[in-house]
Amino acid sequence: MRVISFSRKPREIRRFEIDDERLFSRNIEVDIFDEGTFIRLEGRLRDTRLSEPLHGMDVTMRVSVFDGVITEIEGSMPHWPLQECLAGLDSLSELLGAKILPGFSDLVKSTVGSNRGCTHLAALVMNMGNASVQGRGAYLRKHMPENEMRDKAMAQSAEQFGLIDSCVAWREDGPIVRRWREEHPQDDPRY
């Protein structure tokens, strides 16, 4: 039997004094903005190798808050290792009209992450899809008063966005889902 130890106490991460010691670094950022009944996602991926820029990718998506449909998508590559990499941006068009729901990452892997696209671009878009769930939840909190209507919308969104059983906190038999279902049985999407 293999035992893995862990600690909930944060440990100090060793930072190198000399930047040249870092072999590779990847940073992904996603910002989300309110645009009426849509959200706009702006994602950036930056890779450096041996302190030199390697990959620089920017993707912008406009997504419908209520059904997750991608209505606009575009990308650019400020940095690329090979000229041929730029053709990978064309694969983003295959996501136009797709819905960000459970299964979206599989779609991204089979299109943007295929030989028609770029694995690094796919990593960025999958992160953006994941972050869109947070943005759509924030939209509901911002635009709906704290009452039963918002609770119902949040419950339906939890089901639609695939939150149930997506992590330990949102597990079907866990305290969060159980508590919500006990407090709002009339809004339980299972019934």
Image: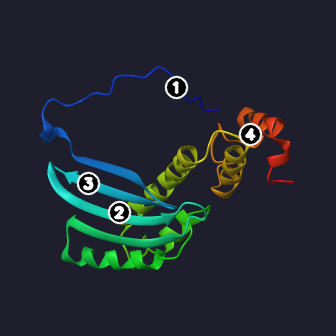
Label 3: which secondary element: strand
SS at circle 2: helix
Residue at 41% across / 60% down in the picture? 40
User: Which quarter of the figure has residue 118?
Assistant: bottom left
Q: CA distance from mark 1 to mark 3?
A: 30 Å
- Number of the front mark, 2 or 3: 3
Point out the tag, 2 or 3, that comes first from the N-terminus: 3
Find the distance from the CA under tag 1 to the CA under tag 4. 26 Å
Residue 120: give its label: 2
Kindly identify which residue carries mark 3. 46
Residue positioned most to the front: 145
Q: Nearer the viewer, residue 64 or 53?
A: 64
Q: Which residue is mark 1?
A: 6
- Name the residue: 57% across, 44% down: 141
Does residue 96 sit above or below 44 in this rendering? below
Q: Which residue is mark 4?
A: 177
Residue kind at label 3, given as amino acid type: Arg
Q: Name the front one of labels 4 and 2.
A: 4
* Label 1 vs label 3, nearer the camera: 3
Q: Is residue 82 above or below residue 27?
A: below
Q: CA distance from mark 2 to mark 3?
A: 10 Å
Earlier sequence position, callout 1 versus callout 3:
1
User: Closer to the camera, 115 or 46?
Assistant: 46
CA gap between label 4 and label 2 equals 35 Å
User: Which residue corresponds to the image point at 33% horizontal and 76% vertical from the top-left?
Assistant: 88
> Dot 2, how many residues are within 10 Å of its Cα: few (below 14), some (14-19), or many (20+)?
some
Image location (x, y in percent) of residue 83: 19, 76
Alpha carbon distance from label 1 to label 2: 30 Å
